[in-house]
Image (tube, rainbow, N blue to C red):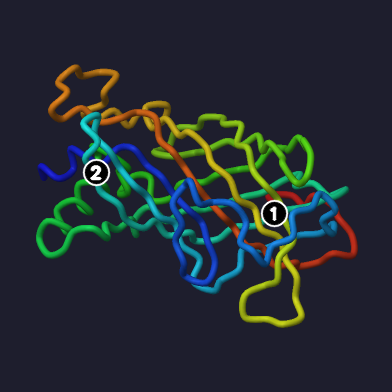
Amino acid sequence: MRNALMSLAFALTIASCGTSTAPSESAPANDAVQTSGLKDGNYVANKVEPNVTWAAEKLTGEGHQGNLFVENAKFMVKDGQIIAGLVTFDMTQISVTDLTGESKENLENHLKSGDFFNVEVHPKAVLTVNHSTAIENGNTTLNCTLNMNGIEATYDIPVVIATAPVPGSEHLEGISVSGKMMLDLTKHDIKYQSGTFFDNLDWAIKDDVTVGFRIMGTSMNASSVKVPQNF
C-alpha cells in the first residue's frame, strides 16, 4: 500500500504497434508526414497493440509507471482538421509495469480503489474532442473534455497531426495525432495525498500530470463528412 503514495502524476502515451514512448518523445514517427491537408472522413484507432503508458511521481521525484487500456477511439476530420473525437479508457485494466508480485498487485488494487480511480463506480474514463484550432505545419490545439472519476474537466491540448501509413497494411494511409498535456487529477476529485492538500514532502504527490500521447487512426469513410448523433 505504501507504493501507492507515489502514484498520482499520470503520464500516458497512446501508440501503435505495441511501442511506448515517454511524453518527451511523443512527436510523430519518422514515417509520418506532418501536414494540415488531411483527408476528410471518419477515423478509428488502429488495433495493432495500441497502448497507454503512465508515469507517477511524488514531490521527491520517486515514482512508478504502467499501462492503461484504450477500449476504443475515433476521430472526425473535416476541411483538414479534427472537428470531433472520442477516446474511451477501461480503468479496470490499469496496470503497473515497474513492480512485480505482491507489490505490483497491491499498487494496482490501490489505483482501482476509491482513493484513486474508483473503478467499481466509474469503470470508464472518456476524452471527448469538442473542436480544434489550427496553428501551422500540422500543429493544432484540441479543446477536449475529460470525464474521469465521474467528473468532467476541460483541457486545451496542443497536438501535431500527420498522415502516416497504417501499421500492418501496405496500402492504407491514416492519421497520427501526438502531443502533450498537463492533467490535474484534483479536477476530477482525485486528491489522495495531493501536494496541494498536504504539506508533508516525504510522501505528498504531484497534482500536475504530464501526458504524452500518439493515436494512430485508420480511415473509415473519406467520401463525405457529416457529424453523426452520439459520435
Q: Position of residue 196 (x, y in %)?
A: 29, 19
Q: Image height check: is 41 above or below 81?
A: below
Give the quarter of the image for residue 39. Answer: bottom right
Label located before the other in sequence (2 or 1): 2
Q: Amino acid at mark 2?
A: Gly
Q: Image height check: is 108 above or below 180?
A: below
Q: Position of residue 202 (x, y in %)?
A: 13, 27
Q: Amino acid at mark 1?
A: Phe
The residues tagged by marks 2 and 1 sit, at their Cα atoms, a distance apart of: 33 Å
Query: At numbered mark 2, what does the secondary structure look like: helix, strand or loop?
Result: strand
Give the quarter of the image for residue 20. Answer: bottom left
Query: At numbered mark 1, what does the secondary structure look like: helix, strand or loop?
Result: strand
Badge 1, how many Cα within 10 Å: few under 14, some, many 20+?
many
Q: Image height check: is 151 above or below 201?
A: below
**Left or right, residue 46 beside residue 135:** left
Badge 2, how many Cα within 10 Å: few under 14, some, many 20+?
some
**Left or right, residue 158 beside residue 163:** left
Q: Position of residue 110 (x, y in %)?
A: 20, 47
Residue shown at 23% from the left, 45% from the top = 113
Quarter of the figure with the N terminus:
top left
Tell me, yes or no, whether the two marked residues, 2 and 1, touch with CB atoms within 8 Å: no
Residue shown at 82% from the left, 56% from the top = 38
In this figure, what is the number of numbered marks?
2
**Left or right, residue 59 beside residue 145:** left
Who is closer to the viewer here, 50 or 19?
19
Who is closer to the viewer here, 143 or 9?
9
Numbered mark located on residue 63 in the image: 2
- Residue under pointer 1: 75
Tell which tag, 2 or 1, sits nearer the viewer.
2
Numbered mark located on residue 30 in the image: none
